[in-house]
Image (tube, rainbow, N blue to C red):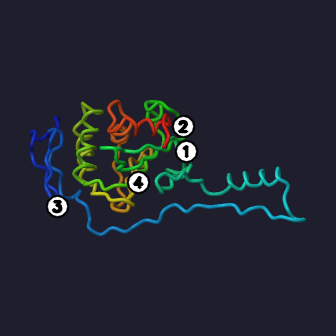
Amino acid sequence: MASQRGAPGAEISHRHRTTTNHGGRYAEMPDMYALDDDFSDRPGDAGCFLEAPMTGARALSPVLACVLASALALAGPAIAKVVDGVDFPDRVDVAGVSLTRNGIGARTALFMRFYLAALYVEKVGTDAGALLAPERPRQVRLAIVKEVTRQRFQDAAREGFEKNTPSPSASLIERENRFLALMPGLVPGDALTFSYEPGIGTRIEGNKVKSIVIPGKDFADALMSIWMGPHPVDDDLKAGLLGKASL
């Protein structure tokens, strides 16, 4: 059955405020998806370090010290890359699968960075289609470094959906609506993770979003296309996620 689409300019109601449906693709978002008011912060990733080798009779040889340090690094927690004071670990675990950081990019507008994003996949690469096609776990992490209003985030996500999934099913539109209704306003220090778990869906978590799963690989692909599709929200951000540019 054909999906119910709102007319251009139709009002989309939320619990606390009203936004405008610019593209006519998204019908009214039900209050059941509205944000809760009580949120709790989540601790960040902890780092680690190695002490300098001992001196004197018990000192290790330089070669042995190097070997030991390398072994300890491999056995220990994932080492983070720090960008603008934000730690992005080299590896994360999704659905019991170890994923490797593919790249980090920044969402920039008017010469200002609004958020940083990192992509994690099983096998690193530079082709978005090849990275996203397999029915395998993947994750995108966002770290907010400048305030992003709820309206701004929703408008950008809505535009990304429309440009990169031009012929969605009614079911996909409903799940996109659900996602848009979940997104809060964000300030520096806030974080979001989008983890695709095959057979389950996209798990959305953050310090301002209670954990929720939106099913379907089609939704996971539509969501990732916002940043890595043919018409991404930011070309430089896409290049960073694909490892073609570095911060």
Q: Nearer the viewer, residue 15 or 58?
A: 58
Picture disc at residue 236: none
Q: Quick check: 217 left or right of 183?
A: right
Which residue is disc 4 drawn over?
A: 143
Q: Position of residue 110 (x, y in %)?
A: 30, 44
Q: Mark 4, mark 3: which one is toward the viewer?
A: 4
Q: Is the C-beta separation of discs 4 and 2 under 8 Å?
A: no
Measured as percent of width and height from the top left, residue 40 is found at 37, 69
Q: Residue beneath label 2, please?
A: 124
| Residue located beneath label 3 in the image | 15
Under mark 2, the amino acid is Val
Measured Cα–Cα span from mark 4 to mark 3: 26 Å
Q: What's the distance in space between the residues labelled 1 and 3, CA to CA? A: 38 Å
Quarter of the rendering occupied by the N terminus? top left
Q: Nearer the viewer, mark 4 or mark 2?
A: 4
Residue 224 in view: yes
Quarter of image, res 164: top left
Q: Quadrant of residue 73?
A: bottom right
Q: CA distance from mark 1 to mark 2?
A: 7 Å
Which amino acid, by three-letter code, is at mark 1?
Answer: Thr
Q: Give the distance between the C-alpha atoms of the residues marked 3 and 2, in whole angstroms.
A: 41 Å
> Which residue is painted at 46% across and 46% down in the image?
118
| Real-space Cα separation, disc 4 to disc 2, in angstroms | 21 Å
- Secondary structure category for the residue under label 3: loop
Near-viewer residue (137 or 164):
164
Considering only order in the chain, which callout, 3 or 4, is on the residue closer to the N terminus?
Answer: 3
Asked whether the beta carbons under mark 1 and mark 2 sit within 8 Å of each other, the answer is: yes
> Which secondary structure lies at badge 2?
loop
Amino acid of disc 3: Arg
Q: Where is mark 1, residue-wise? A: 100
Residue at 43 percent of width and 65 percent of height: 42
